[in-house]
């Protein structure tokens, strides 16, 4: 089963300070973290450039390209998996994090996500979630034959239904348009949160977004804590931006 860690929200930040339990008529914020599949990492093939001859330069180039390959593999459901989902805590105050420490637990946290939103009957708010998070979740759910995926109608993934609120699209017009504040294709969540002065206190002790998935499965208590802080901050800032709309 997945690990569930209820954590109280940060204080002193507009948008989520002293927030009540989520009501059925407002949106609940969520975010996911991903990690490359083991098979994808093992499939990396290095092609040495013809203009590089020295062994030390070749080694450095290979390491750089493998790191880039692994980073990109986590962004696609055919080569990556969901390692953690952060949500508002099933209708209670605080942020809940479901962690899939191993691939076998991914099914559990995705099914819990569908059951959560079906049970609450609320709208969903995410940051760039229509392009990435929800498409990733649906693709992995189909791959893993998760029956609960039917609880979230694929038609709900359209921004004009208002069942799914993508705060990035709402604030910038989306990646297809140029934004003077947050240029296309998309700005960072932290950048937007800073502009609207809704930065989460959990940003103080977080890991980077690139490290987050790896930290969740590290087995190191401090690293897992940093990953939790990063995901909590993402959820809190997404909710705060939704409230700014």
Image (tube, rainbow, N blue to C red):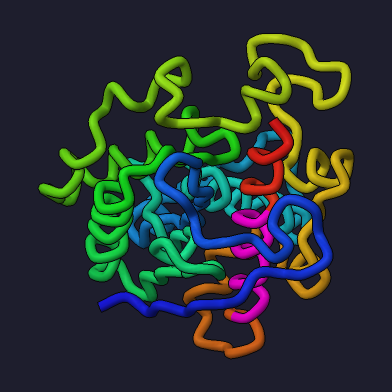
The quadrant of the picture occupied by the C terminus is top right
Considering depth in this image, is 131 or 55 the residue closer to the camera?
A: 131
Does residue 142 appear left or right of residue 10 in this picture? left
Residue 179, placed above or below residue 72:
above
Does residue 117 appear left or right of residue 132 in this picture? left
Q: Position of residue 43 (x, y in %)?
A: 38, 51
Secondary structure mostly taken by the magenta-highlighted segment of the chain? helix
Q: Residue at x 67, y 34 (%)?
A: 50
Is residue 78 located in the magenta-colored stretch of the structure? Answer: no
Does residue 60 appear left or right of residue 108 in this picture? right
Q: Can residue 209 be seen in this snapshot?
A: no
Q: Residue at x 78, y 75 (%)?
A: 205
Q: Quadrant of residue 184?
A: top right
Q: Position of residue 53 (x, y in %)?
A: 74, 47
Q: Position of residue 56 (x, y in %)?
A: 77, 61
Q: Residue at x 23, y 69 (%)?
A: 104
Q: Quadrant of residue 11?
A: bottom right
The quadrant of the picture occupied by the N terminus is bottom left
Considering depth in this image, is 95 or 110 the residue closer to the camera?
A: 95
Q: Quadrant of residue 210?
A: bottom right
Q: Residue at x 38, y 34 (%)?
A: 135
**What residue occupies the far bottom of the structure in this picture?**
221
Residue 1, placed above or below residue 76:
below
Considering depth in this image, is 43 or 100 the residue closer to the camera?
A: 100
Is residue 226 located in the magenta-colored stretch of the structure? Answer: yes
Q: Which residues are magenta?
A: 225-236
Q: Position of residue 52 (x, y in %)?
A: 74, 42
Q: Can residue 243 be seen in this snapshot?
A: yes
């Amino acid at each position: 089963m997945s690990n569930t860690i209820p954590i109280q929200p940060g204080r002193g930040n507009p948008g989520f300070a002293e927030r009540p339990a989520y009501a059925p008529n407002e949106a609940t914020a969520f975010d996911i973290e991903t990690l490359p599949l083991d098979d994808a990492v093992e499939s990396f093939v290095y092609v040495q450039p013809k203009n590089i001859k020295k062994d030390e330069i070749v080694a450095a180039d290979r390491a750089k390209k493998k790191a880039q390959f692994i980073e990109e593999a986590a962004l696609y459901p055919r080569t990556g998996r969901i390692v953690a989902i952060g949500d508002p805590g099933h209708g209670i105050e605080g942020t809940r994090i479901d962690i899939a420490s191993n691939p076998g637990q991914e099914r559990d946290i995705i099914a819990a996500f569908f059951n959560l939103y079906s049970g609450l009957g609320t709208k969903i708010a995410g940051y760039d979630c229509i392009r990435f998070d929800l498409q990733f979740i649906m693709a992995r759910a189909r791959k893993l034959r998760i029956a609960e995926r039917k609880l979230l109608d694929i038609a709900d993934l359209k921004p004009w239904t208002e069942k799914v609120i993508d705060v990035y699209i709402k604030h910038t017009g989306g990646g297809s348009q140029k934004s003077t504040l947050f240029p296309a294709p998309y700005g960072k969540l932290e950048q937007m949160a800073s502009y609207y002065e809704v930065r989460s206190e959990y940003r103080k002790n977080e890991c980077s977004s690139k490290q987050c998935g790896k930290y969740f499965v590290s087995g190191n208590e401090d690293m897992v804590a940093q990953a939790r802080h990063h995901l909590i901050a993402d959820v809190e800032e997404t909710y705060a931006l939704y409230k700014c709309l």
